[in-house]
Amino acid sequence: CTHLLSPSPPLPISFQLAGGIILGVGLWLRHDSQTSLILQSSLDDQHAPNTFYIGIYILIAVGAVMMFVGFLGCYGAIQESQCLLGTFFTCLVILFACEVAAGIWGFVNKDQIAKDVKQFYDQALLQSKDKDENKAKKAQAVVKTFQETLNCCGGGLSELMTSTCSATELFTKEKNCHYKIDELFSGKLYLIGIAAIVVAVIMIFEMILSMVLCCGIRNSSVY
């Protein structure tokens, strides 16, 4: 039994390390300067759509729980405890379900998130020409934040393109703010998706391992 369990701690430890990496990625995405500046913008009483942060918070929570669960699995394997390993397996199943739910959420919302941010930007762009000077100034500040952060100009409102883009930028797709918004959030969502897939694969191996260890402990106790 000791021979059976001796190789097991490295895998829960690797699970802890993976949890730490996922937590780090989540925190980096949450505090990334580009997304933070854009999603903290506000237009009168309306704030920029922050649905994107839902996926980030799920990633952070899963990473933190993974670190604790990894410790539980490692301790359970060392102590040859069926109870702890059973708890470890149950936690893995719950985390795996959360990962699947997060993956489905990301797939469903991957286009909607960028669309909502683009609509918010276009609203600010339109409002920047408002007759109310105070209202226009607030909107101009939002537009400036987007354009300086993303190094872009223009948007989906063709009638306002010429006022925000130079002659050389006017017909350059890569300089359009809509294109830059799509590029920014698509890249971040792909990173979240890759992290979720890596975690899911690790979880599957850990679930198999925990069941093998439980069976090994149970069989050894018979003898």
Image (spheres, helix red, strand yellow):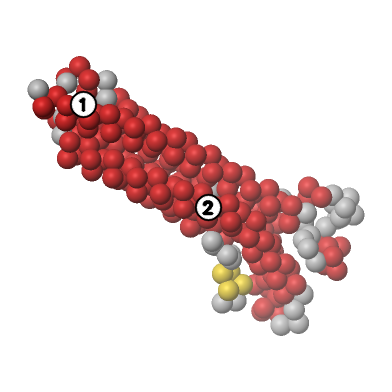
Q: Could you tell which of marks 1 and 2 lies nearer the N-terminus?
A: 2
Asked where in the image residue 160 lies, by quadrant, the reply is: bottom right
Q: Are marks 1 and 2 in contact (CB under 8 Å)?
A: no
Q: Nearer the viewer, residue 32 or 71?
A: 71
Q: CA distance from mark 1 to mark 2?
A: 35 Å
Q: Which mark is residue 216?
A: 1
Query: Which residue type carries mark 1?
Result: Gly
Q: Residue at x 54, y 62 (%)?
A: 50
Q: In terms of image quadrants, where is residue 67? A: top left
Q: Amino acid at mark 2?
A: Ile
Vertical side of 5 occupied by 52: above or below: below
Q: Is residue 36 visible?
A: no
Q: Is residue 196 left or right of residue 3?
A: right
- With 44 as the anchor, is 28 left or right in this view? left
Q: Is residue 55 above or below residue 206?
A: below
Q: Residues within 10 Å of mark 2 (few under 14, many from 20)?
A: few
- The answer to whether residue 92 shows anywhere in this view is yes
Q: Position of residue 4 (x, y in %)?
A: 22, 20
Question: Please, which residue is most extreme toward the top here?
Answer: 3
Q: Nearer the viewer, mark 1 or mark 2?
A: 1
Residue at the bottom extreme, as displayed:
132
Quadrant position of the C terminus in the picture: top left
Residue at 53% over, 52% down: 104
Q: Nearer the viewer, residue 170 or 104?
A: 104
Give the residue number, with chain letter if any, for mark 2.
Answer: 104
